[in-house]
């Protein structure tokens, strides 16, 4: 495809930033559409496993939306869209959920998708050695948490497979958002014939990395690209128009923008605000609300971050308006953990707007709190290190935070830039003082955020152990009255963010994307705001 519009302003922007020297990492010989109708998508650097039971990061998320079918999901109208399942039923107290797999569900080698393939992912994810950050979302299932903690045998897991096409979940107690959880990796099937462990390499080998979705893995070149081809065995193959989707890895957003301008990719996602300004008014620009929050984890096992007065002081001393003005026009200040653009499914309003803001910035109060904690004017305060990925937005953010805390509290924050995968590993191991965190919603419920601060959460990397918070969130899980449940969720967030200050919320983001105007049928996933290409087409 050929770009219809070339923005002169973009050329000036690229020249002024030195972007024209940016390199393209993928093999130039591999282009979408060589074997039919196809597109090429630019994405961030290669991170994480492609095994749904393993350590999930950006690569899996790009792969899974076009290659894997969950049991069911919700469309943009909030209606159920059946995928691997064709129906389900639930008992009166919502503790037993039975799913019936579609008879025409096949893996990309033509073999049937069975209930055992769903069990395969679940049981492997419940082994802590797999490193799944999503394992705690299996904990509503009877004995799942005990199995994960080594306190029960896998045979006690509350999942039944009466036959190859039936999957039955027995929950320990009612879970009002259980259907929302089904789009998570740990509830996605992995072929039991090949998917044996997270480190055997099956997930990147086209011969063993089978797909039950519209596309299958055809080629994977680490740190360069992977190619998906149409899955001829897909139950809904007649609705799939593309033959090939190539995902190319780039180290930075500027190189992605360069590649789009040069016609080397057809879609470039999550770009910088300068691109939004350069392409303003063109058909190429596709800006969406990200259902995501950029924030900072504070390690409560590190002094003096175990003192709530210090945590509050740091939060109150950050000027988020100034931060966003510097970082880019695609950001907005936020004071919440729950994403600014997440809507309450029951009211249609933004969830965070239905309660008071957790806290107000106040430099004078921050200085007073720090003095009360024993560090007047920052005297005697130890130097802390902020670890963050080597991405442009995160580098700019780190420098602003460093300067603001020095100016407002007279404390020194050292900066440690890391490769994205290294930053993930550092955070997951709890080996940090302050660490950058970004969370895009996995499902359309505030629990996707609040659950990460639970004492038993596999994403709780900062040593939070708050029984009061845990009990409030637990109460919200089984509360069937939408209004009462929303009140509990707001109460939990206020406790965590506005009283205990377990995190430093920074900003919400717009997603700045460039999409060739000839491409049609791209969907935005309601739960996360990410783009989905499974039913995309090219309008020639």
Image (cartoon, helix red, strand yellow):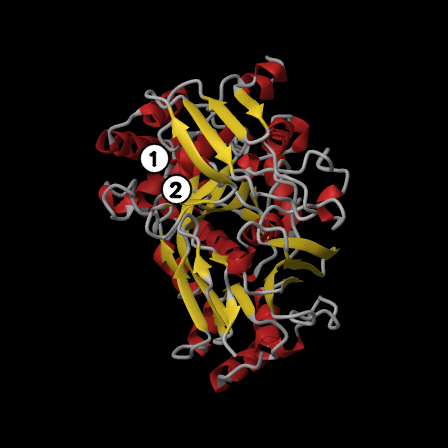
Disc 2 packing (10 Å; few <14; some 14–19; many ≥20):
many
Pinpoint residue 358: horizontal percent, then vertical percent.
29, 40
Disc 1 packing (10 Å; few <14; some 14–19; many ≥20):
many
Disc ID at residue 17: none
Q: Residue at the front extreme? A: 103
Report whether residue 533 is seen.
no
Q: Nearer the viewer, residue 441 or 212?
A: 212
Pinpoint residue 375: horizontal percent, then vertical percent.
44, 36
The secondary structure type at the circle numbered 2 is loop
At x 37% / y 54%, what residue is drawn?
320
Pinpoint residue 123: horizontal percent, then vertical percent.
62, 26
The secondary structure type at the circle numbered 1 is helix
Label 1, label 2: how many angstroms apart (C-alpha)? 7 Å
Contact? badges 1 and 2 (CB < 8 Å): yes
Pinpoint residue 158: horizontal percent, then vertical percent.
52, 19
Disc ID at residue 493: 1
The answer to whether 417 appears left or right of 521 in the picture is: right
At x 38% / y 79%, what residue is drawn?
281
Q: Nearer the viewer, residue 202 or 310?
A: 202
- First in sequence: mark 1 vs mark 2: 2
The answer to which quarter of the image holds residue 493 is: top left
At x 55% / y 65%, what residue is drawn?
241
The answer to whether 454 appears left or right of 476 in the picture is: right
Q: Quadrant of the N terminus?
A: bottom right
Q: Check the image and report above or below for 8 versus 476.
A: below
The answer to which quarter of the image holds residue 248 is: bottom right
At x 61% / y 56%, what residue is drawn?
390
Q: How many marks?
A: 2
The answer to whether 110 appears left or right of 500 in the picture is: right
Report whether residue 488 is seen.
yes
Q: Check the image and report above or below for 525 versus 244.
A: above
Disc ID at residue 337: 2
């Amino acid at each position: 495809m050929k770009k219809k519009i070339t923005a002169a302003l973009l050329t000036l922007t690229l020249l002024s930033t030195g972007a024209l020297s940016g390199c393209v990492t993928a093999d130039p010989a591999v282009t979408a559409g060589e074997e039919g109708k196809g597109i090429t998508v630019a994405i961030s650097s290669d991170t994480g496993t492609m095994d749904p039971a393993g350590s999930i990061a950006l690569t899996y998320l790009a792969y899974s939306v076009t290659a894997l079918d969950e049991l069911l999901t919700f469309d943009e109208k909030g209606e159920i869209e059946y995928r691997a399942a064709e129906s389900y039923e639930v008992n009166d107290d919502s503790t037993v959920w039975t799913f019936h797999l579609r008879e025409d569900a096949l893996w990309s080698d033509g073999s049937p998708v069975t209930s055992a393939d769903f069990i395969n992912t679940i049981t492997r994810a419940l082994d802590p050695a797999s490193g799944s950050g999503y394992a705690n979302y299996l904990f509503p299932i009877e004995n799942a948490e005990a199995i994960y903690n080594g306190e029960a045998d896998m045979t006690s897991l509350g999942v039944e497979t009466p036959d190859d096409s039936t999957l039955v979940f027995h929950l320990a107690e009612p879970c009002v958002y259980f259907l929302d959880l089904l789009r998570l990796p740990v509830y996605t099937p992995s072929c039991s014939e090949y998917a044996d462990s997270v480190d055997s390499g099956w997930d990147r080998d086209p011969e063993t990395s089978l797909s039950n979705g519209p596309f299958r893995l055809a080629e994977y070149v680490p740190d360069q690209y992977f190619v998906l081809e149409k899955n001829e065995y897909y139950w809904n193959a007649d609705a799939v128009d593309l033959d090939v989707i190539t995902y190319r890895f780039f180290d930075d957003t500027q190189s992605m923008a360069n590649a789009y301008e040069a016609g080397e990719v057809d879609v470039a996602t999550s770009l910088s605000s300068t691109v939004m300004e350069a392409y303003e008014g063109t058909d190429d620009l596709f800006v969406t609300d990200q259902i995501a929050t950029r924030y900072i984890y504070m390690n409560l096992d590190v002094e003096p971050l175990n003192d709530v007065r210090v945590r509050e002081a740091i939060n109150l001393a950050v000027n988020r308006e100034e931060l966003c003005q510097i970082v880019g026009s695609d950001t907005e200040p936020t004071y919440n953990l729950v994403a600014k653009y997440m809507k309450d499914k029951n009211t249609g309003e933004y969830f965070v707007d239905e309660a008071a803001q957790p806290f107000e910035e106040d430099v004078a109060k921050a200085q007073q709190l720090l003095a009360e904690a024993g560090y007047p004017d920052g005297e005697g305060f130890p130097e802390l290190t902020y670890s963050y990925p080597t991405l442009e937005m995160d580098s700019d953010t780190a420098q602003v935070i460093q300067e603001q805390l020095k100016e407002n509290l007279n404390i020194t924050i050292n900066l440690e830039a890391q490769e994205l995968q290294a930053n993930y590993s550092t955070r997951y191991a709890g080996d940090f003082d302050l660490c950058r965190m970004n969370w895009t919603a996995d499902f359309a419920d505030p629990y996707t955020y609040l659950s990460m601060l639970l004492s038993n959460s596999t994403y709780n990397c900062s040593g939070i152990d708050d029984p009061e918070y845990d009990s409030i969130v637990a109460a919200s899980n089984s509360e069937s009255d939408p209004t009462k449940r929303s009140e509990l969720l707001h109460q939990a967030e206020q406790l965590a963010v506005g009283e205990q200050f377990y995190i430093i919320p920074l900003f919400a983001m717009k997603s700045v994307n460039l999409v060739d105007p000839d491409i049609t049928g791209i969907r935005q996933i309601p739960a996360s705001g990410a783009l989905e290409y499974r039913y995309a087409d090219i309008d020639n």
